[in-house]
Amino acid sequence: MKKKDDDKELPLGLKERQGQFFVLGRAGLDLYPHPEGSKIFSAHMFRSDLGGSAGNICVSLIRNGFSASLIGAISNDPAGKFVKEKLKRYGIGIEYLYETDGRMKTSLALAEIRSKDCEVVIYRNNAADLYIQEEHLHKINLASAKGLIITGTALSAEPSRSVVFELVKVANKEHCPVIFDIDYRKDAWSFEEAYAVYKKMLDFTDILVGNEEEFSVMFENENNGTWVEQIYPKALLDSKIISLIKRGKKGCSIVSKSINKAIDIYQVEEKKPFGAGDAFLGAFLARIAEGKSLVEAGKSGAASAAITVSRDGCASSIPTKEEIENFQTVRSRNN
């Protein structure tokens, strides 16, 4: 780790490295009930957008001024082609996006644009994104990459799981920072299996990202709400990892050997609760890659998350760097 002061503990090489970000995981088709605010069962029609955590993180990185490529797989059918075209329009690299045969399907999400009683239904039966093959790895050059971001759902099944572990081993060998977004989905696999696999990932991780529930899964704690005080210091405070704990309306915490800092949220009129975490992570990593402090990066991420939940859609709602800076400037004047 390179240390400048308590506020600027930066992952090895994230600023100095000249390449692009690689994000491994799912991109999918999102459908939103229309008129806006409708429940899924009462919708007259649906509006489409790019979705999926890895796809959204790529969008956030690009809108914050960095290049990003998706490592993943999509189905060779109209839904997969929709996702591929959307990725290209957002400027996301698709050289490492692979097509599966007709048996595997691209993820589909139905998501309500509602601040309360918001339901999200995700269809991932025989999910295409879990069929990344090890033979694809030789094309991925991590020697100069800005960073490798792993979204945790990619660990939920084979062959994707083995591909992830092979890739993070290469990343560590090449001193490429590994960012692990826990991204726990209880419908994807059992708590016990997730816990065991997540623990293995800690050995390869430089930045660990998740919400309170996901950190509870990481550390097998069933008593939600006390893990920060009781489990976190013992498990990670003396490790090399920088942890970013997203705490919803309570903001987020950045914790490592040399920093334990809470970042407040920006209050906005919320349209929907999803998309904030992906927007946050992209802006957070972009600011670190520019040499900003962890706290500055956290505040930028919080602004990005606030703007995202105040808009409809998912990928299309993620703000640019200029929008984030303007938002922060206006908020600072009003405080």
Image (cartoon, rainbow, N blue to C red):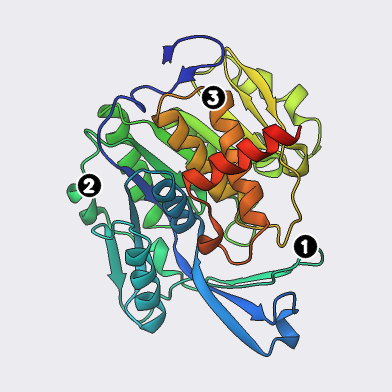
The type of residue carrying mark 3 is Leu
User: What's the residue at 56%, 62% (across, down)?
Assistant: 314
> In the shown orientation, is residue 212 left or right of residue 49?
right
Classify mark 3: helix, strand or loop. helix
Classify mark 2: helix, strand or loop. loop
Q: Which residue is mark 1?
A: 115
The answer for how far apart the CA atoms under marks 2 and 3 are is: 28 Å
Please tell me in which quadrant of the rendered image residue 189 appears: bottom right
Marks 2,1: beta carbons within 8 A: no
The type of residue carrying mark 2 is Ile
The disc, 1 or 3, on the residue closer to the chain's N-terminal end is: 1
Q: Quadrant of the C terminus?
A: top right
x, y (%) of residue 12? 37, 22
Counting other residues with Cα less than 10 Å from the Cα at mark 2, is it few (<14), some (14-19), or many (20 or more)?
A: some
> In the shown orientation, is residue 241 left or right of residue 113?
left
Classify mark 1: helix, strand or loop. loop
Please tell me in which quadrant of the rendered image residue 225 appears: top right
Q: Is residue 19 above or below residue 206?
A: below
> In the shown orientation, is residue 202 left or right of residue 36?
left
The answer for how far apart the CA atoms under marks 2 and 1 are is: 40 Å
> Which numbered mark, 2 or 1, is in the foreground of this view?
1
x, y (%) of residue 158? 40, 57
Counting other residues with Cα less than 10 Å from the Cα at mark 1, is it few (<14), some (14-19), or many (20 or more)?
A: some
Q: Which residue is mark 2?
A: 140
